């Protein structure tokens, strides 16, 4: 009986302590946003002129084009299927591609965006949790196409890239 009374006396103190500890843990692990850090603004023209051609590019005999899997193949369908006889997307299709692919960009940490890490070799910091069925398109972060996509996710504008 004494043990039960003791338990009834300390239980509320234990619950208060546990609740306080949990609240402190939640507060300390909550993400913080800086008022001075603007969200990355993705540029449609840069995407249309510099990124979309990468999706159609034949990279090597060991790798499928991005388009092969992500427009009509076995991978997630981020890209619009090209119109019959067409070798590039029209304006409406490009806008749809832009919206879909923009969802693969991590606005809080652009360099950890799925569009960058999933097709990148794990040896270069790529995704190790999910196998990329089309092969690792980029062996390193030095690949010019990987760098172009990285520029876009970091907010590069077509007007600033025009002189290249």
Image: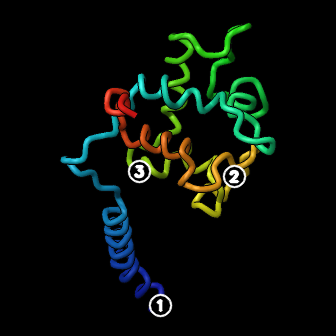
N-terminal label among 1 and 2: 1
Question: Tag 1: Cα neighbours inside 10 Å, few (<14), some, or many (≥20)?
Answer: few
Residue occupied by mark 1: 3
Q: Residue at x 49, y 52 (%)?
A: 112
Residue 53, quarter of picture:
top right
Q: Are marks 3 and 2 in contact (CB under 8 Å)?
A: no
- Please give the residue where the numbered disc 3 appears in the rendered image: 109
Mark nearer the N terminus (3 vs 2)? 3
Q: For the C terminus, which image quadrant?
A: top left
SS for dot 2: loop
Q: Which mark is residue 130?
A: 2
Residue 27 position (above or below residue 8): above
Q: How is the image coloured?
A: rainbow
Q: Position of residue 117 (x, y in %)?
A: 57, 50
Closer mark to the observer between disc 1 and disc 2: 2
* Viewer-closest of 12 and 145: 145
- Spot occupied by residue 149 in the image (x, y as percentages of width and height): 50, 40
Which residue is painted at 55% across and 23% down in the image? 97
Q: Compare marks 3 and 1 and give the one earlier in the sequence.
A: 1
Query: Could you tell me how far apart the alpha carbons at marks 3 and 2 are, in whole angstroms?
Result: 19 Å
Q: Is residue 93 above or below residue 12?
A: above
Check the image and report above or below for 5 versus 125: below
């Amino acid at each position: 009986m004494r043990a039960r009374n003791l338990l009834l006396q300390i239980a509320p103190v234990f619950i208060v302590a546990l609740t306080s500890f949990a609240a402190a843990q939640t507060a300390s692990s909550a993400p913080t946003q800086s008022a001075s850090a603007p969200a990355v603004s993705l540029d449609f023209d840069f995407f249309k002129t510099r990124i979309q051609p990468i999706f159609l590019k034949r990279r090597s005999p060991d790798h499928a084009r991005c388009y092969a899997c992500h427009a009509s193949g076995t991978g997630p369908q981020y890209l619009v299927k090209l119109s019959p006889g067409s070798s590039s997307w029209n304006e409406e299709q490009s806008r749809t591609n832009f919206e879909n692919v923009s969802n693969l960009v991590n606005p809080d940490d652009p360099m950890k965006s799925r569009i960058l890490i999933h097709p990148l070799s794990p040896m270069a910091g790529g995704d190790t949790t999910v196998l990329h069925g089309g092969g690792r398109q980029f062996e390193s972060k030095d690949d010019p196409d990987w760098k172009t996509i990285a520029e876009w996710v970091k907010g590069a504008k077509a007007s600033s890239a025009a002189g290249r």
